[in-house]
Image (spheres, rainbow, N blue to C red):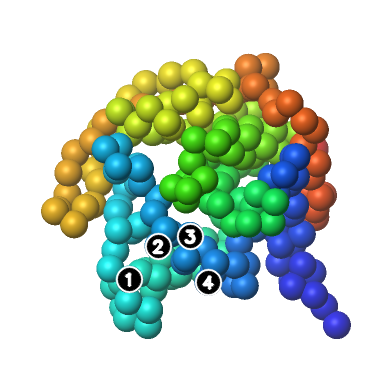
Amino acid sequence: MLTMEDVFPPFRLRIRCGAIEQRVLRDDDIPELVDLVRGGVQAPGTPMPFLADWHEAPFAPGQPGAFPAVSLSWWWQQRAAFAPDAWHLALTVRHDGVLVGMQDVHATDFPLTRTVETGSWLGRDHQGKGIGTLMRQMAISFAFDELDAVACESGYIVGNEASRAVSRKAGYVDNGQRTLVQQTRQGAVRAQEQRVIVTPDAVVRPGERVVVEGAEELRRFLSIER
């Protein structure tokens, strides 16, 4: 009988470095992920880090338009829309086996651009411990070493000093700003996003070795030729 890894090869992906492990989100992870979000994501006094304040939606299991239904739909959509020309790896981040956050790696037209976008967040109880920097460095190293990316892009809301620090520690440099619109409970607001970019010759890698499993199967599934 086929396994889920056979049916959906991204499930084979496993990225490890020290006490941190990243794997593609599975349905079994979702209850723990919901609890993590309920414990808080955004530190007090910091700019709202997302395009929409999904992390502050009312908690009402089983109700449409509330958390976790809206987020659950989004997580499933990323899997359903997976294709070589547009893919999204939603990676759970575990520290010593405990779910602490999410690391996204996604791309459009990757076979031509060889450029990926990264984004991440941590539960509040796990912030300020160096985990955010390591998980980003792991994702970038994976993209360069296993997917043969030539650039990794990201961005953060101007004023988010924690995100700025993570980007700097991973080797990103500024790549212009853009104006975007964030959807909040108070309505749509305008914000400035600082774009950043890192290339293989500038990336700051983790102090320990990054070990990747399942990369060959993932490349085949994404039609990435080496």
- Which residue lies at the image location 32% right of the left edge and 76% below the top edge? 60
Which residue ends up furthest to the left in the rendered image? 186
Residue carrying label 3: 36
Separation (CA) of disc 4 from disc 3: 9 Å
Separation (CA) of disc 4 from disc 2: 11 Å
Other-residue count near label 3 (Cα within 10 Å), few / some / many at <14 / 14–19 / ≥20 = some
Identity of the amino acid at label 2? Answer: Arg
Other-residue count near label 4 (Cα within 10 Å), few / some / many at <14 / 14–19 / ≥20 = few
Residue carrying label 4: 31
Quadrant of residue 132 within the rendered picture: top right
Identity of the amino acid at label 3? Answer: Leu
Assess whether mark 1 and mark 2 are in contact (beta carbons under 8 angstroms): yes
Identity of the amino acid at label 1? Answer: Phe
Q: State which tag comes first along the sequence, 4 or 2.
A: 4
Q: State which tag comes first along the sequence, 2 or 1.
A: 2
Q: Which mark is residue 38?
A: 2
Q: State which tag comes first along the sequence, 1 or 3.
A: 3
Where residue 1 sits in the image (x, y, percent)?
A: 85, 82
In the picture provided, is 126 more to the left or to the right than 216? left
Where residue 191 sits in the image (x, y, percent)?
A: 23, 36
- Which residue lies at the image location 47% right of the left edge and 65% below the top edge? 35
Quadrant of residue 3 within the rendered picture: bottom right
Q: Nearer the viewer, residue 149 or 28?
A: 28
Where residue 171 sits in the image (x, y, percent)?
A: 57, 20
Other-residue count near label 1 (Cα within 10 Å), few / some / many at <14 / 14–19 / ≥20 = some
Which residue ends up furthest to the right in the rendered image? 1
For the question of whether residue 223 can be seen, the reply is no
Residue carrying label 1: 59
- Which residue lies at the image location 48% right of the left edge and 60% below the top edge? 36
Separation (CA) of disc 1 from disc 3: 13 Å
Separation (CA) of disc 2 from disc 1: 8 Å
